[in-house]
Image: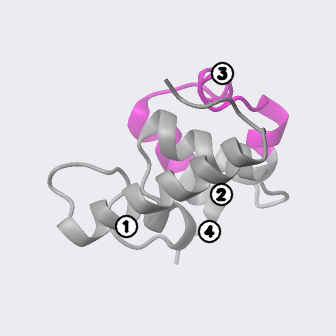
Amino acid sequence: MQTQGERLEEIITVLKLSREELAEKINSSVPSISKVVRNKGNFGIDVYINLITNLNVSVNWLLSGKGTMFIQEKASEHDAKFDEFIKEKVLSVLIEYDIIDAVK
C-alpha cells in the first residue's frame, strides 16, 4: 500500500510540477513537501484543503489511497459526492473560525 508521501510524489509526477510549483499552488514550502514525500512529516489542514480545492485531488485517494487520484467525471458518483461534501464541510469550518475568508 502506498504511503501518503508516495501519493504526494505521484501527484507531482502526474501534474508534471516541480516541488517549487506545487508549494506555490498549495501554499506550502519545498522543505515541508520534501518531509511529507520522505514520510518524515505531515501537512497542516490548510495544505490538505489546498490540495483538494486547488488541485482537485480526491480526499479519499489522498488519505487512503483508494479510489481515483482526482475528482473527475469518470469517478463514481458516490466518490465525487463524498469529495464535494468534504470540501464544503472543511471550507465552512475554516470560514466559520475565520481561518480563511468566504469564497466569492
Badge 4 vs badge 2, beta-carbon distance below 8 Å? yes
Q: Give the Cα distance between marks 1 and 3.
A: 27 Å
User: Could you tell me how many numbered marks the image carries?
Assistant: 4
- The span shown in magenta is 9-34
* Marker disc for residue 82: 1
Give the residue pinned by disc 3: 24
Give the residue pinned by disc 4: 3
Marked residue nearer the N-terminal end (1 or 2): 2
Q: What amino acid is at disc 4?
A: Thr
Which image quadrant for residue 20? top right
User: Label 3's element?
Assistant: helix
Marked residue nearer the N-terminal end (4 or 3): 4
Q: Taking 4 as reference, is 7 left or right?
A: left
Determine the residue positioned at 58% across, 58% down.
6
Q: Give the Cα distance between marks 4 and 3.
A: 23 Å
Q: Give the Cα distance between marks 3 and 2.
A: 18 Å
Give the residue pinned by disc 2: 5
Tell me if mark 3 has few (under 14), some (14-19) or many (20+) residues whose alpha carbon lies within 10 angstroms of its own. few
Q: Residue 79's x, y, as percent?
A: 30, 67
Q: Residue 86's x, y, as percent?
A: 49, 61
Is residue 32 magenta-colored?
A: yes
Tell which tag, 3 or 2, sits nearer the viewer: 3
Tell which tag, 1 or 2, sits nearer the viewer: 1
Q: Taking 71 as reference, is 104 left or right?
A: right
Badge 4 vs badge 1, beta-carbon distance below 8 Å? no
Q: What amino acid is at disc 1?
A: Phe
